[in-house]
């Protein structure tokens, strides 16, 4: 076998090889992930991104449609007194049900887990569970706010509506089927002074929480913004 | 001569590779295993050249059949949810090291024999001068 011929063949093979290597490096560089464990993982990621995009588009469409609906209603009821009073009633009911974004005077309460509590810093007879915010704490705060005349309440932007349940699921809390965790920002619309004193009074519930090291702070605001309830209230069995 | 050809081939290949488009990410796993197979073939080719038993048919067929079989095994492993490509990688890389060992041995021996010959020649020269 001629040595030159061998060289040429090996050269051609190396040419193919280095083309492949460079293409491979370029391909790997183009993707965001460093290592894909399997090929299916890749397609799943792709699918998720596509669905997310679709979901965002649909949400935007719904918002636009709602705006249009309000505009049309206003236009129609402009010159009709009975219709306009009905319209007002509908708006009021929607506000009460939690289907609209609201603004108004109120308070913003922040409740945070005890930042200093570890197994070392608490005493032997103490329970570390006392130093974190539980679902029951939130329920009692909400109850206290309602008692003080709060007209609309939200926790971490989850609107408290008639069907809302506040439950514990492991290390987070579930409100309206959404997970929320500390720090909890509780917004309430109502008479600010009354809401504040209801929570802050001596022997009140925040007092109990503060004793356990849970950090709370209240701000009185002229313009509290509360977002609407995004879920669906079903009426299947009501008659 | 062989090494010059290999280096030239690599440089030209890299230049071409930079200018052509990339492949879909899904197939990059297959290309990777084909690259390993091709690398193994190149080392095998160099070794057989040094041993003077290089056969073009064996080399070319080995290059393609190895690569295709490795890709097919990877595909099968993908379907069976077993990482068969790992077996191909182990075999190819193991063979690469074997071939590399043979190449290294060849050049080290060549260098050592050259030194011994030079030493012998010097001794003979000295003996002649002493006469």
Image (cartoon, rainbow, N blue to C red):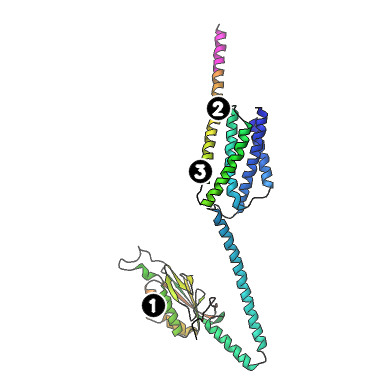
Instruction: Please tell me which residue is depicted at 58% across the width and 34% down the height of the picture.
Output: B44
Considering depth in this image, is A154 or B73 the residue closer to the camera? B73
Relative to A135, is B29 on the left or the right? right
Which element carries disc 3, helix, strand or loop?
helix
Image quarter hosting the C terminus of chain B: top right
**Mark 2 surroundings within 10 Å by alpha-carbon count, few (fewer than 14), some (14 through 19), many (20 or more):** some
In x, y percent, where is residue A127?
A: 34, 68
In this rendering, is residue B66 above or below A166? above
- Badge 3: chain ID: B
Residue ID for mark 1? A207
Q: Select label 2 or label 1 by which is in front.
A: 2
In x, y percent, where is residue A40?
A: 55, 56
Q: Select label 2 or label 3 by which is in front.
A: 3
Instruction: Please tell me which residue is depicted at 41% across the width and 79% down the height of the picture.
Output: A140
In x, y percent, where is residue A76?
A: 67, 87
Magenta residue check for A209: no
Residue ID for mark 2? B106
């Amino acid at each position: 076998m001629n040595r030159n011929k061998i060289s040429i063949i090996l050269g051609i093979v190396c040419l193919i090889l280095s083309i492949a290597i460079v293409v491979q490096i370029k391909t790997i560089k183009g993707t965001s992930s460093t290592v894909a464990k399997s090929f299916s993982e890749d397609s799943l990621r792709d699918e998720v991104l596509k669905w997310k995009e679709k979901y965002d588009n649909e949400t935007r469409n719904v918002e636009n449609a709602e705006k249009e609906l309000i505009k049309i209603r206003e236009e129609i009821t402009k010159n009709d007194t009975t219709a306009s009073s009905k319209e007002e009633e509908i708006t009021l009911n929607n506000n009460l049900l939690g289907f609209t974004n609201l603004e108004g005077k109120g308070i913003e309460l922040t409740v945070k887990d005890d930042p200093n509590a570890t197994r070392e810093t608490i005493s032997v007879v103490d329970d570390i569970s006392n130093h974190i915010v539980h679902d029951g704490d939130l329920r009692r705060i909400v109850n206290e706010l309602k008692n003080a005349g709060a007209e609309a309440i939200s926790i971490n932007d989850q609107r408290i509506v008639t069907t809302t349940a506040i439950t514990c699921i492991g290390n987070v809390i579930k409100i309206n089927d959404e997970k929320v965790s500390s720090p909890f920002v509780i917004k309430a619309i109502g008479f600010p002074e009354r809401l504040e004193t209801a929570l802050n009074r001596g022997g009140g519930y925040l007092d109990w929480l503060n004793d356990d090291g849970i950090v709370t702070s209240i701000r009185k605001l002229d313009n509290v913004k509360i977002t609407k309830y995004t879920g669906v209230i079903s009426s299947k069995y009501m008659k | 001569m062989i090494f010059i050809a290999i280096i030239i081939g690599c440089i030209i290949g890299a230049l071409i590779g930079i200018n052509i488009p990339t492949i879909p990410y899904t197939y990059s796993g297959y290309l990777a295993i084909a690259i390993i197979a091709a690398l193994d073939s190149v080392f095998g080719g160099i070794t057989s050249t040094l041993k003077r038993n290089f056969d073009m048919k064996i080399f070319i067929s080995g290059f393609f059949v190895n690569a295709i079989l490795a890709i097919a095994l990877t595909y099968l492993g993908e379907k069976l949810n077993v990482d068969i490509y790992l077996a191909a990688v182990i075999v190819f890389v193991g063979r690469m090291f074997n071939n590399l060992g043979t190449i290294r041995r060849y050049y080290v021996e060549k260098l050592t024999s050259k030194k011994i010959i030079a030493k012998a020649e010097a001794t003979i020269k000295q003996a002649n001068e002493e006469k």
